[in-house]
Image (cartoon, rainbow, N blue to C red):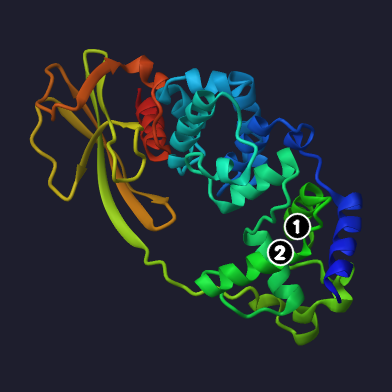
Amino acid sequence: MVHNDFTNVLLRWFDENRRDLPWRQTRDPYAIWLSEVILQQTRIQQGWAYWERFMKRFPTVEDLAAASEDEVLRLWQGLGYYSRARNLHAAARQIVAQGRFPDTMEGIRKLKGVGDYTAAAIGSIAFGLPEAVVDGNVYRVLARHFGIETPINTTEGKHLFKQLAQSLLPADKPSEFNQAMMDFGALQCTPKSPRCLLCPLSESCEALHSGNVDTLPVKLRKITIKTRHLIYIYIRCNGKMAIRRRGKGDIWQGLWEPLLIEDSEIPAFEGRLTLLQTGVKHVLTHRILMADFYLLETSQHPSLPEDYIWIDEDRISDYGVPRLVELLLEKVAAVD
């Protein structure tokens, strides 16, 4: 199949099968950018609710820029990969400082946290720029259809797939083509059990003819998973609890947590220490966290590092916390 045929078949499929998503009902670059950032590492059904929540709370980029980081992180709570929220907030302030949303690929790429894929998505959908997106869906569709065995996570592979996607992109319909590739990979050419028998590209699909659908795309395995052991102690003292904000250079930067003990024994405390749960497993991309939860009830403030603050217990909902701490708070609430 020549490239034009692939593109035409894909666009016809998209006309009949496109997903009806709220951020596709607008050309507002802010709304489109927000959806792209939220949907990184997030399923559409989960991300949809967060997008609506953000658009309601921050209907314009100026509203988002004017918010505090704590407010943004609280609204983001539960989505994970919190650097996305911090970058989103920082980029909103960049945009406001510039006076408008950038409308060139160079300008969009300069926004904090915006990589090549997100820039291409915003540029093509919001501004009609002829820039092809390349993400997991695109890698899969192209690798299978054209029978490409070059690993997608190598420099050579990234360059090859970008060039191929760009060569397929119709200059007059970049938005439709990019969204068609996203939807085709999400609905038709899925990672597992793709709908090959009903695929409009089945006659020209190299992977289907060679029996390699399940082996493409090729990805080199490089990730080493590490396990960390954490002890969280919820300290309750006269209706108050102790928390601190996590610093830079580790997971959950900027979020809040109760007393954390890692790689050491629990010190002696005045008061009653209750074990709530052990072996709580929380899986992140490159590591597995195993946590034990405790409740310390005391009438005297224990000695804590200087970065801990005391807040009213019922105010913890005002602070953004990681999902693992949410689980601890649920356990504490269950024993009250």
Q: Quadrant of residue 139?
A: bottom right
Rendered residue at 45%/32% (across/down): 90
Q: Position of residue 315 (x, y in %)?
A: 37, 16
Q: Amino acid at mark 2?
A: Ala
**Tags 2 and 1 touching, CB below 8 Å:** yes
Q: Amino acid at mark 1?
A: Met
Which image quadrant: the C terminus?
Answer: top left
Which of 47 and 85 lies nearest the eye of the viewer? 85
Q: Position of residue 66 (x, y in %)?
A: 48, 18
Task: State whether residue 229 appears in this view.
Answer: yes
Q: Position of residue 151 (x, y in %)?
A: 56, 75
Question: Does residue 83 lie above or below 272 as drawn?
Answer: below
Upstream in sequence: badge 2 or badge 1: 2
SS type, badge 2: helix
Rendered residue at 34%/38% (across/down): 253
Rendered residue at 37%/56% (across/down): 288
Is residue 130 toward the left or the right of residue 97 in the image?
right
